[in-house]
Image: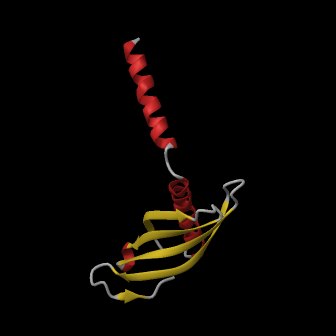
Amino acid sequence: MLRAAAAGVAFLALATSASAATPAQRVAAQLRPQLASALKKQYPTLKVNFTKVTCKIAKNDKSGLCAAYFAVPAARAIGVFAIGLTINPATGKYTWKQLSARCKDAKTGAKLACF
């Protein structure tokens, strides 16, 4: 009985922390696989690892900006995509568009051409 109660408390703590994510954090988590899928379609042989995605949503909840950090190990490159969001505040659904990309050599820091 005590073990079941402890498991229930642990589950509630995990559920609460998972639901405590901000809307920007939820969008960032959803955006990562979408970006990976889009790049895989456009560049099927290129292996891109998204290391971090962060987002900020405007106060009116209708737009946002994200930064998607990535690495291309085979090319020894790292970079960041700037992503623009258009959000429907009623549904929470969004569309995204790549605004820019910056890439550099992972070892030397020299600027590289991006996608």
Give the farthest residue toward the top.
1
Q: Position of residue 81 (x, y in %)?
A: 49, 75
10 sits left or right of 88 in the view:
left
Q: Quadrant of the N terminus?
A: top left
Q: Is residue 89 left or right of residue 67?
A: right
> To which quarter of the image does residue 11 belong?
top left
Quarter of the image holding residue 27? Answer: bottom right
Looking at the image, residue 44 sits to the left or right of residue 86; the answer is left
In the rendered image, residue 2, in percent from the top left (x then y), is placed at 38, 14
Q: Position of residue 85 (x, y in %)?
A: 61, 68
- Tell me what residue is drawn at x 49 percent, y 80 percent: 101
Residue at the spot x=49%, y=44% of the render? 20
Q: Residue furthest left?
A: 108
The number of numbered badges drawn on the structure is 0
Q: Position of residue 58 (x, y in %)?
A: 58, 65
- Residue at image point 41% right, 24% down: 7
Q: Is residue 48 visible?
A: no
The residue nearer to you, when weighing 108 against 67, is: 67
Query: Is 45 located above or below residue 93 in the figure?
Result: below
> Which colour style is shown?
secondary structure
Residue at position x 49%, y 36% in the image: 15
Residue 32 visible here: yes
